[in-house]
Amino acid sequence: MFKIRKYRESDAIPVGILIHDTYTKFNLSFASPEEQKDFLGPFQHARSDEPAHRAEIARVIRASMVFVAENDGEIVGVLRGRADKMQSLFVREDCHRQGVGRKLVQRFEQECLKHGASKIKLMGTLYATPFYQAVGYKKSTGVRSMRTFDGEGLPYQPMKKILTKP
């Protein structure tokens, strides 16, 4: 069984690897290997032992709120955001459809409510849009194109959810 907890700096490397692997597999298939590096930014070095690479990955992961899903001591999901915006959500492939993403989103929304937020916005990749709809997010405009690190042209769906207190 997995648990949701706050991110710790010591989680940076496993979180970096998780982001690299899931982002590449589910969102970057349209891009060449060179273009993928541009989209991945520092996460292209997720398995590097170089201190500078590790420090940059840890820096990029930082956000107002970061939660991880842990299963038997292994990180299987991560959500980053602030009180009004979900910045990223990644769940390890073998843990899809097991409630990990849903639990991360629920924890994040609870924290947002504590911080006085009434609405959360996000930019969902096309792969993730059905998941976000399943947890109550609505499309707010048509599909757009975003820049990620040095990569340009990743399609995304702007979405939002009005929060209600339990």
Image (tube, rainbow, N blue to C red):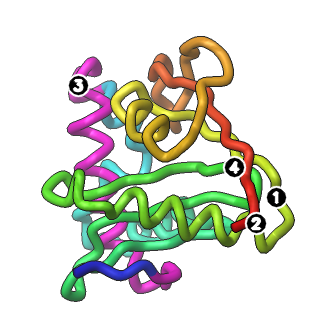
Q: Amino acid at mark 1?
A: Ala
x and y percent of residue 121 in the render?
68, 41
Mark 4 element type: strand
- Kindly report the distance in space between the C-alpha atoms of the residues bearing marks 2 and 1: 5 Å
- Give the mark nearer the N terminus: 3 vs 1: 3
Q: Identify the disc placed on residue 85.
A: 4
* Quarter occupied by the N terminus: bottom left
For residue 115, above or below residue 146 = below
- Kindly report the distance in space between the C-alpha atoms of the residues bearing marks 4 and 3: 26 Å
Q: Identify the disc placed on residue 29.
A: 3
Q: Would residue 36 appear left or right of 104 to someone viewing this image?
A: left
Rate crowding at label 4 as few (under 14), some (14 to 19) or many (20 or more) other CA atoms within 10 Å: some
Q: Tell me which residue sits at (43%, 44%) in the image.
A: 41
Q: Tell me which residue sits at (77%, 47%) in the image.
A: 119
Q: Which residues are magenta?
A: 5-34
For residue 40, above or below residue 92 = above
**Label 1 sits on residue:** 117
**Label 2 sits on residue:** 113
